[in-house]
Image (tube, rainbow, N blue to C red):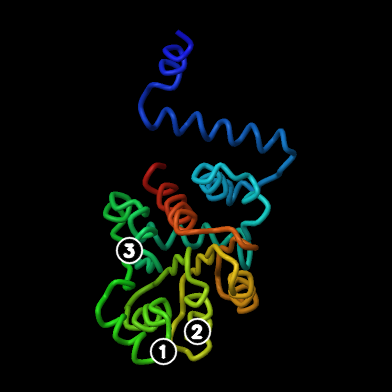
Amino acid sequence: MAHENLASDVAGRPSDIESRSFETITRELAEMGKSVDPAVAHVVKRVIHTTADFSFADTLEFRPGVEVVAKTTEALAAGGVTIVTDTNMALAGISKPALKKLGDAALCYMADPDVAAAAKANGTTRAVASMDKACELEGPVIFAIGNAPTALLRIRELVEAGKLDPLLVVGVPVGFVNVVEAKDEIAASGMPSILARGRKGGSTIAAAIMNAMLYKVTRA
């Protein structure tokens, strides 16, 4: 009977379950005494919703300030933005209906044969070769990087060389080698960015951050 009551309690539309989850997140953040700027609360809470990890309330960093979220959201709402991911997992996680509704796009070059060939020829990672290929894109570009710190390092090199001018860099790779250092490089560059400082992150985090901004428009 207890199991039946529990099942009945959680049954309902996915949107109802999501709403209850966000209510729980809001309540528990308050109980922890964590203050989240209203301008970025929807981003922070969606990352927590994705991970059940409240530490992101402390480690997500918005540069040059929280206004970067509003500026990026406005650009997404205007359409014509291309989101480049470093994994097909992140690509799969970004809402396709929201992209279609706004006239934006998302892609990942990691599995492209020419990227594999370029990486082999130049002795680099596919992530580096993917960032090089992204230089060919026209219009505003957002990089959503959840796995490869080498992608972040290459983005900075390309920006310094005048080959890239990202609308935003979501720098949230996870791991132990060059992850913290790569995030530090993006922070030091001054380019618009959302970073998960420290070792935590991942493709799901990159997708969650993008979805938070897309949903801000499409679910308004």
Viewed as shown, does residue 47 lie left or right of 113? right
Give the vertical position of 160 relative to 14 (above or below). Answer: below
The image shows a total of numbered marks equal to: 3
Position in image of residue 133 (x %, y %): 34, 82
Mark 1 or mark 3: which comes first in sequence? 3
- Do callouts 2 and 3 mark residues in contact (Cβ within 8 Å)? no
Position in image of residue 145 (x %, y %): 47, 67
For label 1, the crowd category at 10 Å Cα-Cα, with few meaning under 14, some 14 to 19 and many 20 or more, is few
Question: What residue is pinned by disc 3?
Answer: 106
Question: What residue is pinned by disc 2?
Answer: 159
Q: Which amino acid type is marked by label 2?
A: Val
Q: Nearer the viewer, residue 56 or 70?
A: 56
Mark 1 or mark 2: which comes first in sequence? 1
Residue at point 65% right, 77% down? Answer: 188
Give the vertical position of 83 relative to 212 (above or below). Answer: below
Q: Assign the C terminus to one quadrant of the image.
A: top left
As helix, strand or loop, the secondary structure at mark 3 comes to strand
Q: Which amino acid type is marked by label 1?
A: Gly
Position in image of residue 134 (x %, y %): 36, 79
Q: Which amino acid type is marked by label 3?
A: Ala
Viewed as shown, does residue 61 lie left or right of 112? right
Q: For the view shown, which residue lies furthest in the left direction?
A: 113
